[in-house]
Image (spheres, rainbow, N blue to C red):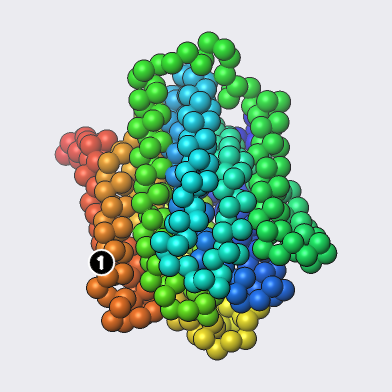
Amino acid sequence: MKHINVNLTQDAIVKSLLLFALPILISNIFQQLYNTVDTMVIGNYLGELSLAAIGSSAVVFQLLVGFAIGMSSGLSIVAARHYGAEDNDTLKRAVAGALISGLIIVAVLTLISELFLHSLLQILNTPEDIIAQAYSYIHIITMFLGVMFFYNMLAGMLRAIGNSLMPLIFLIISSTLNIGLDLLLILKFGMGIKGAAIATVISQGISAVLTAIYILNKSHILIPAKKHFKPDKGLYKELIGQGLSMAMMGTIVTLGTVILQYSINNMGYLTIAGHITARRIFFFSLLPIMALSLSMSTFVSQNKGAGRPDRIIKGVKYAFIFTSAWGLLAAVIIMFTAEPLARFLSGSTNPQVLETASKYLKFNLLFLFVLGFLNTSRFTLQGLGTKIIPLVSSVIELAAKIAFVFFIIPSLGYWGVIISEPIIWIVMTVQLLFAYYRHPYISEYRANMRSKNN
């Protein structure tokens, strides 16, 4: 099955990036379908209160899984670097270290969610009329956090060796099952919002099992032997450092979203419902950018391992061109489709719900290309092995969102929420672009090329 793997260090850059990114894009679409189908079914059949409950608990779920998924992404970047260097023994030791780290992380996060989940919903000022439903939904999902973590980790390891197709196939199967289970558990068995959570857990579990079976049968390069589980101080330092960097980055970014949700929860359930609807649509518009950004982390890591800075620089340039073009197209489309999309997704005809969603979408998508530059720069730096600078950008985002919550949103209301993120994106993008162009690996290569040309 070696032909399934895309050769990111030798094939034509645009071709290899697109072939690698396309399955990731489709995978991201189906991952979004987990929550989007929940939103559609709940909004259409259980009403706006239940829809608001999903919205108010979503950021808590993202806070927990953001750490786990960020950690798994960081671990796979290390694996990709050793794969690019054709060091298969170290690659297997990296996989063994990732498995051990994953077990510990899942245990800790599950314990945290059991102890503090309900209190966190209260701290976020979740309205009394939806807090019980919100807790029932998020509690079931966080009890089985491990299934999402291990799917993402195993899928990340496959992508580290250039295989982004098989994780997509498994995800399509499980996402289709999720839709069927949503309808069955909510409509036929009347399980309400708990049914949506159970459907999500079962579907994610199946995707994790299928990915593990495939690796055991077809990707032997990723299967560590007993000797590979022997601790390697240098490698574990690299794994933990890269993993924690991305995990903390994801956690801090999501924490900023949680803080914004605190302000939104004070605006009533109709605004909450409109906001969560807009965010679902916005995430879909962001998926091509995220797919390419995630591809860049593997592309850059493999090519750094292979000693190809020239391919890294060209790949980043192509990524910037793509994200600019997509951002412009998406902004034009949403100007004409924001309200119909919000009505379709939420199942609501309430003017406040639809107006809230439309305002958010029409303004924020004007800055989608900025977010493309931000994510490309951030994941490129991660692929180069930079740990601190992307983390600093996340801290900037968190601090800025706190400032908006306390000083801007109280005066501007929901418009304060709308303008907060584009302003923050611009500041972060400037910082990350500066860091990329000044990165020693990149700047040294550019200097050498200038010397040769002179």
- Rendered location of residue 432, percent (x, y): 28, 52
Kind of residue indicated by mark 1? Ala
The residue depicted at 30 percent of the width and 46 percent of the height is 391
SS category of the residue bearing label 1: helix
Q: Report which residue position mark 1 lands on.
A: 403
Image side of residue 189 versus residue 233, left or right:
right
**Residue 436 in picture, x, y percent from top left:** 27, 46
Q: Nearer the viewer, residue 269 or 164?
A: 269
Residue at image point 18% right, 36% down:
451
Is 156 situated above or below 435?
A: above
Image position, residue 438 (x, y; %)? 21, 44
Q: Nearer the viewer, residue 326 or 338?
A: 338
Is any atom of residue 196 visible in this view?
Answer: yes
Q: What is the total number of numbered labels drawn onto the structure image?
A: 1
Horizontal placement of 409 versus 160: left or right? left
Dividing the image into 4 quarters, which one contains the N terminus?
A: top right
> Residue 416, located in which quarter of the rendered image?
bottom left
Q: Is residue 432 above or below residue 453?
A: below
Against 438, residue 322 (above or below) is: below
**In the image: residue 365, left or right of residue 132:** left
Using a 10 Å C-alpha cutoff, classify the residue at mark 1 as few (fewer than 14 neighbours), some (14 to 19) or many (20 or more): few
Position of 327 compared to 221: left or right? left
Residue 327 position, x and y percent, is 44, 67
